[in-house]
Image (cartoon, rainbow, N blue to C red):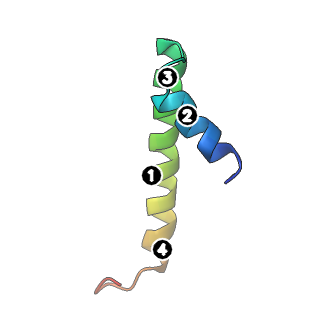
Amino acid sequence: MNEGLPRLWAAAYGSHTGRPRRCAARAALRVLRFVRALALADHTPPAGY
């Protein structure tokens, strides 16, 4: 998954990408950020790090 992240980031914020593709890439980045936060929430102690 880490190999595709720079490519996804470039698609989301690059200037040579069409608007629909940029929107889809940004939505995918938001989903990945949510999934990562959810995974970290399971392993974080109640007092934080």
Mark 2 vs mark 1: give the one in front.
2
Task: Identify the residue position indicated by label 3 in the image.
Answer: 22
Secondary structure under tag 3 reads helix
Question: Tag 1 or tag 2, which sits nearer the N-term?
Answer: 2
Secondary structure under tag 4 reads helix
| Distance CA(mark 3)–CA(mark 2) | 9 Å
Mark 3 vs mark 2: give the one in front.
2
Question: Tag 3 or tag 4, which sits nearer the N-term?
Answer: 3
Mark 4 vs mark 2: give the one in front.
2
| Distance CA(mark 3)–CA(mark 1) | 18 Å
Residue 1 place in picture, x, y as percent:
69, 51
What's under tag 3, amino acid-wise?
Arg
Residue 34 place in picture, x, y as percent:
44, 52
Task: Identify the residue position indicated by label 2 in the image.
Answer: 10
Mark 2 closeness class: few <14, some 14–19, many ≥20 residues within 10 Å: some
Cβ atoms at labels 1 and 4 below 8 Å apart: no
Secondary structure under tag 2 reads helix
> Looking at the picture, does residue 30 appear above or below residue 15?
below
Task: Identify the residue position indicated by label 1 in the image.
Answer: 34
What's under tag 1, amino acid-wise?
Phe
| Distance CA(mark 1)–CA(mark 4) | 13 Å
Secondary structure under tag 1 reads helix
Residue 17: which disc?
none
Question: Tag 1 or tag 3, which sits nearer the N-term?
Answer: 3
What's under tag 2, amino acid-wise?
Ala
Task: Identify the residue position indicated by label 4 in the image.
Answer: 42
Quadrant position of residue 46 = bottom left
> Looking at the picture, does residue 46 appear above or below residue 27?
below
Mark 4 closeness class: few <14, some 14–19, many ≥20 residues within 10 Å: few
> Looking at the picture, does residue 49 appear above or below residue 37?
below
